[in-house]
Amino acid sequence: MFKLPNLPYAYDALTGVISKKIMELHHDKHHATYVNTLNETVKGTEFENMEIEELLRNIKKIPENIRTKVQNHGGGHANHSLFWEIMRTPVENNAPTGNALTQINKTFGSFEKLTDEMNTAGKMRFGSGWSWLVKTSGGDLKIYSTANQDSPLMQGDTPILGIDVWEHAYYLDYFSDRASYLTKWWQVVNWDEVEKRLG
Ligand code: MN3
């Protein structure tokens, strides 16, 4: 059984960047539906007691008759579980420090280049999806976007930081202005959590 995690902060903790209303709907309705549908889909199979990361890393081994549902709802569960954890109360001029900054500078040249590249990946994603910073199995940092709820785990990468660019993530606050949402979103990044994941 997969379980909906609690938010690590109050629903109104991200106010100014993401409203309480969005957080309530996003967590209690969207994420809850991914978890419930995933549980219904894998009930009684050998997959119901797997860790979500293991399930998604082995997506190609899932029987074809349930694979698309596991991909969409399992991906949705993993992606949102990470998303809640890497956010916190907004801070102006929020930026990585220490080891996270060192790794970002080494791969992308600067923090500004990382945000530009991730925002571009998010803007270019047609329809629904995510913009990701991932670590490859070889230990390299990479930026790309995925469609729908596809997780980097499905292609063997480890997600470090992800931005939800589905309309449900921003529409009530930003309407169709995905670019403004992306620009503002960086204020809520919890760099301590990101640094832990970077290793
Ligand atoms: Mn979402």
Image: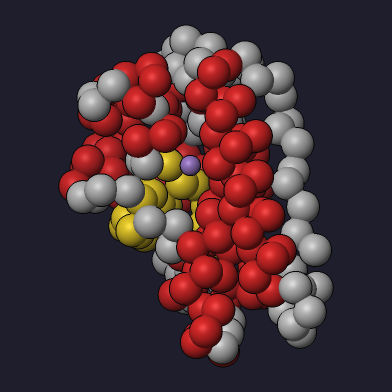
Residue 93: percent from left, percent from top:
42, 16
Colour logic: secondary structure
Decide if residue 40 is in sight here: yes
Q: Quadrant of residue 194?
A: top right
Q: For residue 123, which quarter of the picture? A: top left
The reply, left or right, for residue 187 in relation to residue 115 is right
- Give percent across and percent down for residue 1: 80, 63
Depth check: 107 or 154 in front? 154
Q: Residue at x 39, y 20 (%)?
A: 172
Q: Is 59 situated above or below 175?
A: below
**Whether residue 143 is situated above or below residue 62 in the rendered picture:** above
Is 124 located above or below residue 175 in the figure?
below
Identified at 52% across, 69% down, the residue is 69
Q: Position of residue 142 (x, y in %)?
A: 36, 60
User: Foreground residue, 146 or 140?
Assistant: 146
* Quadrant of image for the C terminus: bottom right
| Residue that appears at 42% across and 52% down | 133
Res. 77 visible in picture = no
Left or right: where does residue 23 sit relative to residue 103?
Answer: right
Question: How many numbered dots are placed on residues in this image?
Answer: 0
The vertical placement of 156 against 118, above or below, is: below
Residue at left offset 28%, top offset 44%: 122
